[in-house]
Amino acid sequence: MQILQILPNRAIHKKVLLLAIPMVLSNITVPLLGLVDAAVIGHLDHAWYLGGVALGSMMISVSFWLLGFLRMSTTGLTAQSFGSKNTHQLGLVFTQGMTMALGFAVLFLLFHSWIGDAVFSFSEASEKVKYYGQQYFSIRAWSAPAALANFVLLGWLLGTQNAKAPMWMVIITNVTNIVLDIVFVLGLGWQVEGAALASVIADYTGMAFGLMCVRHTWRVQQMPALAVLIKDTANGLMRFVKLNRDIFLRSLCLQTTFTFMTFQGASFGDDIVAANAVLMSFLMMISYGMDGFAYAMEAMVGKAIGAKDRDELNQSLVGTFFWSLVICIGLTIAFGVLGSSLINVITDIPAVHDKALVFMPWLVAMPLVSMWCFLLDGIFIGATKGREMRNSMFIATCSFFLIFMVFSSAQNHALWFAMLSFMAMRGVTLAMVLAYQWRKGTFLA
């Protein structure tokens, strides 16, 4: 089916937007939560409260983020089962995902004290900041069962082509967190403990809502009894484990790159690290926007592959790429025309503003360069091709460090050039694999 035949098809655009927009809206609540957390804790008497929450929250975020493969693998496998109308396999993916999530949660709870002590021993923060950081971490750790289960719930619901339930699940979690932050910290004066407890309760609230949505889908799809599926959970579990292993290694490479970006930028001076923080917030904005379309791609591609429907796959690819291109052109124009004004929204420090403006051209180029890697990630997640994603990310990570070393004399410009190249290489390598498998007719296999 030709691209020009697909583009005028309003049904395709409606399908893409109905999946993507709810996920974009739910993503917007994530940075909002961070801002509210900072505002609530930042109004306490001493800076060490905010520093402690930032330190403890970072450790929790990294720990859980590295296990985010649970959502990605669940989405792809669920979408394929949904597309093939295999309700037994659809239920099996859910039980396998929840088994892995709860297993990782138990391991994390068993070792979280040791992990916390080890990481905080390397921190050069003040004793007060480390004290409150450990306090926050030790309480937030108990949200692990819910937080990891939520990855599976989000992935499974999205895989069944239901974007509204995940949207409300994320919004309910974050709004609950915000409200309880205000009540516990400002109202009851529980300080850091209150902020941590608010997040724990919010995660379990989100999980409860997610389970209700799964139960509804279970009835509508007339799926097998849970007791029957639990007995068969071990069947095919190795495929689930292998896919998660590959996506975990991919995530590790990604985390390594962004961590290096932060620490290397700090070595160039306080103004540079502050400017990079401003620009990275814009990069996160791009990521949140593009993730919504990547999620839509995961769900639609997985469904098309499960149904062995090449036309549906073509339509999904063309429709999602079209709207992603529209969004990225808009972001490019916004960064190019309003760059200085956007920086002023985040900081009014003249030195930081001027430094950020110097490196703003890299952000102007970022949307159109990076959109391909986000969408191709969505395609390969939907196709459950974890090995290809792992290999692509490894090549891109090597290119990031190679380019930075070659151009290191340019300092921060080299860092942003390396990041832009990293995003481009992810897209190029995955595009090459997709083109090869598409030509050979093996992508749908």
Image (cartoon, rainbow, N blue to C red):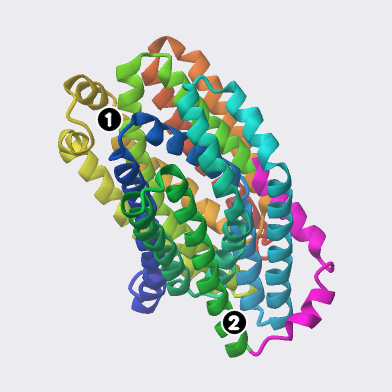
- Mark 2 Cα within 10 Å, few/some/many (few <14, many 20+)? few
Q: Please report contact status of discs 1 and 2: CB closer than 8 Å, yes or no.
A: no
Residue farthest to the front, as pictured: 188
- Name which residue type carries label 2: Arg
Query: Which residue in the structure is indicated by mark 2?
Result: 215
Judge left or right: residue 183 versus residue 113.
left
* Magenta run includes residue 102: no
Q: Position of residue 148 (x, y in %)?
A: 61, 57
Asked which secondary structure carries label 2, the reply is: helix
Q: Position of residue 279 (x, y in %)?
A: 32, 33
Please tell me which residue lies in front, 33 or 316: 33
Residue at point 17% right, 29% down? 348
Q: Can residue 90 be seen?
A: yes
Report the magenta residues as a range: 222-249
For residue 152, what is the image quadrant? bottom right
Q: Position of residue 14 (x, y in %)?
A: 36, 75
Residue 389's disc number: none
- Name which residue type carries label 1: Pro
Residue 361's disc number: 1
* Magenta run includes residue 223: yes
